[in-house]
């Protein structure tokens, strides 16, 4: 079997310390996993969620990496893998009455997007 050189190539983009909940980002990522590049852009531009904008920027970045670094065509790309992992939790203290303080936890997440070229069989 003859293997195409571009079949193993996988372009990726990573965004770290995105200031949003992991569950809110996963809700958007689950909608675009396995879809083509153009279809993903249409879906993300029309989604009403706050998490869709950073993910849209990340998909653009992964496609730019694929075309510039690996010479792949953007029209033939699809999202092979997309994952959201928990990041660091930023902890702040909010002053309250009688000299007390409450802890405020601000969650972050890390998002990875992997793009592959569709095989032309």
Image (tube, rainbow, N blue to C red):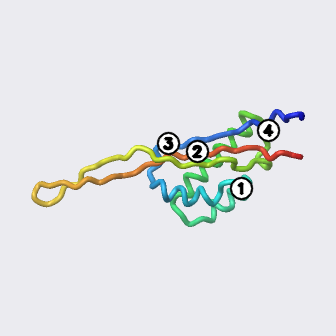
Give residue 49's position: percent from left, percent from top: 53, 63
Q: Residues within 10 Å of mark 2 (few under 14, many from 20)?
A: some
For disc 3, the marked residue is 16
Q: Is residue 90 above or below residue 70?
A: below
- Residue visible at 60% across and 47% down? 58
Which residue is identified by label 4? 7
Residues at circles 2 and 1 in contact by the CB criterion of under 8 Å: no
Where is residue 88 drawn, in percent x and y? Answer: 40, 43
Q: CA distance from mark 1 to mark 4?
A: 17 Å
Residue beneath the point at 58% across and 52% down: 55
Q: Nearer the viewer, residue 81 or 56?
A: 81
The quarter in which the N terminus is drawn is: top right
Up-down: is 1 above or below 37? Answer: above
Per the rendering, the mark at residue 35 is 1
**Left or right for 62, reference 75:** left
Secondary structure beneath disc 2?
strand
Dot 4, how many residues are within 10 Å of its Cα: few (below 14), some (14-19), or many (20+)? few
Distance of mark 2 from mark 1, alpha carbons?
15 Å
Residue at mark 1 to residue at mark 3: CA–CA distance: 23 Å
Crowd tier of the residue under label 1, counting other residues whose Cα lies within 10 Å: few below 14, some 14–19, many 20 or above: some
């Amino acid at each position: 079997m003859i293997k195409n050189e571009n079949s193993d190539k996988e372009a990726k983009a990573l965004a770290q310390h995105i200031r949003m909940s992991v569950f809110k980002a996963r809700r958007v990522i689950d909608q675009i996993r396995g879809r083509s590049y153009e279809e993903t852009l249409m879906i993300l531009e029309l989604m009403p969620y706050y998490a869709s904008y950073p993910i849209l920027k990340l998909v653009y970045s992964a496609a730019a990496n694929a075309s510039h670094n690996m010479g792949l065509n953007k029209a033939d790309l699809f999202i092979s893998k997309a994952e959201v992992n928990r990041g660091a939790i930023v902890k702040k203290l909010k002053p309250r009455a009688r000299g007390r303080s409450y802890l405020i936890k601000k969650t972050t997440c890390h998002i990875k997007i992997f793009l592959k070229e569709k095989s032309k069989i």
